[in-house]
Image: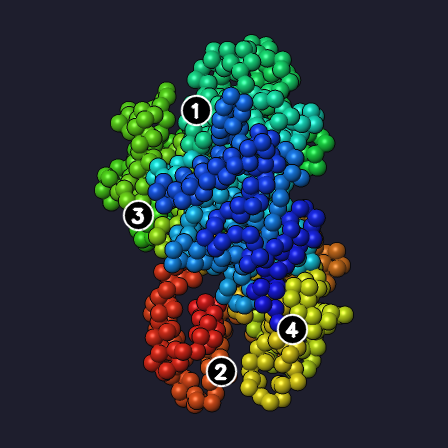
Amino acid sequence: MTFSEANSVRDLIRDRLVEASSGWMFTAGPALPRKDTDVLIKPLLRDALLRLNPMLAAEPHRADEVIYELRALTLAAGSVGLVRANEDFRRWLLGEHSRPFGPERRHQTVRLVDFEDLSRNTYVLSTEVTFRVGPVERRFDLVLWVNGIPMVVGEAKTATRPGVSWLDGAVQIHEGYEGDVPDFFVPNAFSFATDGRDLRYGAVRAPDESWFPWRSEGCDGPLDSVGRAACELLSPTTLLDIVKHFTVYGTDGRHQKIKVISRQPQYRAGNKIVDRVLAGRPRKGLIWHFQGSGKSLLMLFTAQKLRNHPWLGSPTVLIVVDRIDLDTQITSTFNASDVPNVETATSGAELRDWLGSGQRKIIITTVFKFADADPELSDRDDIVCLVDEAHRTQEGDLGDRMRASLPHAFFFGMTGTPINRTDRNTFRNFGAQEDPGRYLDRYPQSESIADDATLPIHFEPRGTEFTLDPEEIDREFDRLAGTLNEEETKLLTKRTVRMERLFKSSERIRLVCADVVRHFTEHVAAKGFKAQVVVYDKETCGLYKAELDRLIGEDASAVVISKGQGTPGSVQPHLRSKLEEERLLDRFRDPDDPLQIIIVTAKLLTGFDAPILQTMYLDKVMKDHTLLQAICRTNRPYTLGDQEKTHGTVVDYIGVFRHLDRALQFDEAKMQETLTSIRALAAELPAALNACLAFFPGVDRNVEGHDGLVEAQRRLSDLTVRDLFGLEYVRLQRLWEALSPDPELAPYRDDYTWLTQVYQSVKPRDTTGRRVWRRLGAQTRALIDQHLHVDAIRDDLETLVLDAAVAEAMEGAPEQHIDRVQASIGARLRLRAGNPRFASIGERLEALRREYENGQITSLLCLKRLLDLAREIVTLERTIDNDEAGKEALTALFERVHQDRSAPERVGRIVWEIDDIVRSVRWENWQRTGLGDRRVRQALRGVLLKYNLHRDDELFEKAYDYIRQYY
């Protein structure tokens, strides 16, 4: 009845891959025909070389020569670096090497793998594979071999042990295996790690924050989801597709060689585009991926596959950007990669020549170069246009000219902020009627945050001493703006004299800058991050620069504005050439450079990628997609030493919240915090145990291994059922720990152990601190799916957090959530039964239920009031629980585990010392940093050592787990 790491996770992946009939055959590591010092399985590779290269059949010893070269290449990791050696090996895999094996010693291509007819390859999956280099020996949980080449290494972690996650496996591979035995990873396509909840994969030398999730929907619990995800990601079709088309090598900002592989959404969308081109119709499609989720790389991978596909005959791929110049993130991405035949059209004439002469390349151009295009530049039907920011200029006259000049081309629009208006409609221009919702692929904000592709964004509003009178601005601006487009609105803004006077008030600028410096010093610079200030116009940039210079010195900030007519003389000194601006922005991205703040008004609000940018100080009116694009400059993940960027921050001096719901299509009723924490009340043990077991009718609890665990998780596949189980289990757990040790618990111990393992296997695992079950781990997903973190800040204002759960909730209708929220609040109130401070909330909940059932209020208003009640419960619970909850949990733990040698007063002293020392070394969100983790662990070990309890590893892990949850 034990669910171990091997039988519940590793063997699940092994069995699912073998059972999927995709070609994988299992051979245990010790049974492979290889030595522990061999990277390659030579007999399998030799057979493949003879099978795939007819010129070797007559002289089989030539195959041994190739194997000798490949073996020498695996040894090169120590001299040229692992990434460089990995790139060289991939060239062999792609058939880019030839040898004089033909008649008269003519060079012929050597093929190691057949990418077209996958049935001609051999696929072997092994567990417990040992590899040794000198005295260093490492053993891998899973290795996947293609023709005897180890293309994938996997690490499986237990699904039932708290405190262990996929991250442990990723770190083990990245910081351990790749450094200790790099030879084995020279042929590596990617590695993966899983804990039975998440499956994540990464390229060689990729840090853990660059390991991406691969998810599968519609599954019977987390373990089943991981099994299906493994079958999808590790199928020969997907694996070899990633190797050939969805992998690139380039250089990072420090000019170091890196390997980049696609995320799942990029892989999915790229293949949908290629499939549509192969099908020939419809000849357009809209790709709607949230801002910051990697559209530049999506276009790069897609262009690479379109160019290399054997059935498409090297089509021309146009990468169309909407900036006047070509200094874009997409251009930089293509230029930094190793994709061949990429050209940049520097003029309209050059673009016309290339298209007119039938050049078959990847051509990067701007939409503006179609301004003077001939009525028809090319009538070819194998031109594929990948259009960046498909909601902007591509929808106006320039977009019409582009389509008219390429009448038979494919047009795929990429956007993070589609517009659905009469005058500018992304769905009409790029969305095909055949596609559900008129988009070919969508990757919403909720998924990008949950996948760690982007970060949540915190909004900090400022009080009336900063914010301009919202009613006055709305009357002045909205009345005049009406339904004007973006460019017309900019002109109107410049002519609104009243607004300009308010924005440029010297007293207000001094006040805002003083607050910027204080906030930046305390919350941004202290962690090594940087910031952006967005102001009214170019002249205001200069005013802010002068005041910031007075407060923090000239070197700390810089103005970045565009050239053009109307640039005031006061800011002319801040104008730079393109090269000078690039150097300035490189300085901004450098954590060691003293430049910490950039001041802008229009530049760098789209297409600017600087992950070190953590905070935006917003003092400019923006709306709709412009607002969303701007604030998303802060949502890129970034790690600096022990400091991990957990969120982006927007400090709002203008009252942008009035427009945020329009930009994001959110409803104000859903922008409320609904965090819950679970704390069980005493109940009869048999009743509590039976309430938990009732979730698993017909499940044989004596079945071990992944079969038994999958069957249990299948009963919890519905999220509402899983949440209810979580509530019931936590009640049972608290009761069990309160009673333990007690001889009367013995008859129930096996069932309780089984329930605990199942519970741990479905509880969301927190590796980044963003999605947690509070307290003992069970927070109802009904509220998580709609929660908005609201934390008190200065001036009694609130920080509004736009995170994955909020974004996901906003995508549904209110009535979809009412029952779940109402049930969850009711469960919370039952846990507080008898407490008069919660009685009035229960009365109001019942009154609200009657109003909604009688049709007296709308579903939207009902949900808003329910969320208000949930927030009120949380606030009250925090007041009651926070001070003592940590001590209570630790006290119960020490009384239960060490009752035989720990008298009550001794337990009290231990808990008091742990509480005191942990509070002295921790800080807010310490759990999300490596430094915080180490300091708290050291503090805890110090106390346990003092009381001679340091040898009890189980006690240490449980105590540390409680500290992470309560402190």
Could you tell me if residue 702 is visible in this image?
yes
Question: Three-letter amino acid code at disc 2?
Answer: Val
Structural crowding at the residue carrying mark 1, measured as other residues with C-alpha within 10 Å and reported as few (<14), some (14–19) or many (≥20): some
Structural crowding at the residue carrying mark 3, measured as other residues with C-alpha within 10 Å and reported as few (<14), some (14–19) or many (≥20): some
N-terminal-most mark, 2 or 1: 1
Looking at this view, is 886 or 574 the one in front? 886
Name the residue that disc number 4 marks: 1
Question: Three-letter amino acid code at disc 4?
Answer: Met
Q: Secondary structure at mark 3?
A: helix
Looking at this view, is 953 or 47 the one in front? 47
Q: Secondary structure at mark 4?
A: loop
Question: Three-letter amino acid code at disc 1?
Answer: Leu
The correct choice, above or below, for 49 with respect to 706 in the image is: above
CB contact under 8 Å: marks 1 and 3 = no
| Residue 80, quarter of picture | top left
CB contact under 8 Å: marks 4 and 3 = no
- Structural distance between the alpha carbons of marks 2 and 4: 23 Å
Name the residue that disc number 1 marks: 326
The picture places residue 241, in percent across and down from the top left corner, at 59, 38
Which of the two marks, 1 or 4, is nearer to us in this view? Answer: 4
| Residue at the (67%, 52%) spot, across then down | 18
N-terminal-most mark, 2 or 4: 4
- Structural distance between the alpha carbons of marks 1 and 3: 34 Å
Name the residue that disc number 2 marks: 897
